[in-house]
Image: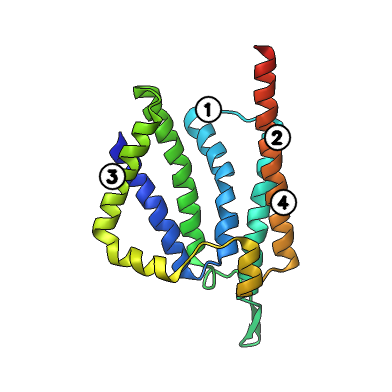
Amino acid sequence: GYARIVFIFFVVNDSNNLALRYNVSIPLFIIFHTGTLLANVLLGFCLRNRICSLGKLLSIMFVSVGVVLFTLADQFSKHPIIEKDGKSVHPLSILHFNPGIFLLIFATLLSAYLGICQEDLYCTYGDHSQEGIFFIMDMYYKCTYTYFADYIAECCNGYNTKEILIDVILFKNPFTFMHCIGCLLVLLGTIAFTLCDFKFMFAQKKSV
């Protein structure tokens, strides 16, 4: 059970790291990970027949639209429309579209599936969270460090995770009005989703 989770965990992290090699900006990398809400709902519906409330669906829609807007804004800022042979080349053409985006989508879907695998494991063997953390992290870091020690050291020396505002201000990543709208939608959707969870928990406690 733990071996499958460790393997999926490794693939998710490796896909995220590979995405950064394809000129994916840090703000886009951060904002894209909020798309796990949509991935969790989709896989939960397809694999577990779970149906969310209307409030959660609306909040997820806000987050999804925000992620899409932020992604498109990032591509527009990197690939402006140019003239080639008298024709306008659109920045979202398949030749210009960043492969890192597909890696992020793959990692997001796989991380949602990882949650379902963990749920199955706990349903079968019980909720032993401390044991799970020990085995998963121990196996993961041993395997990772054994085969990628030099690469990890290189990445740690050359890269530190930064917040969106720090990255935009200090490193001058483009942050247009479209970026701002996408970020705002993601923030509002995340807050709304959290409030729906709090409302559900409060209703459960009140009924008890």
At which x and y percent is residue 115? 45, 37
Q: Which residue is mark 3?
A: 139
Q: Secondary structure at mark 1?
A: loop
Classify the position of the N terminus by image quarter.
top left
**x 62%, y 62%: residue:** 164
- Which of 33/152 is in front? 152
Looking at the picture, which amino acid does disc 3 mark? Met
Three-letter code for the amino acid on which mark 1 is drawn: Asn
At label 2, the amino acid type is: Leu
Are the residues flagged by discs 4 and 2 in contact, CB closer than 8 Å?
A: no
Residue holding disc 1: 49
Q: Name the spot of residue 180 as percent of width and height, x first.
A: 73, 61
Residue 173 appears in view: no
Please name which of the two marks, 4 or 2, marks the residue nearer to the observer.
2
Whichever of labels 4 and 2 marks the residue nearer the N terminus, that label is: 4
**Badge 4 is on which residue?**
185
Which numbered disc, 1 or 3, marks the residue that appears first in the sequence? 1
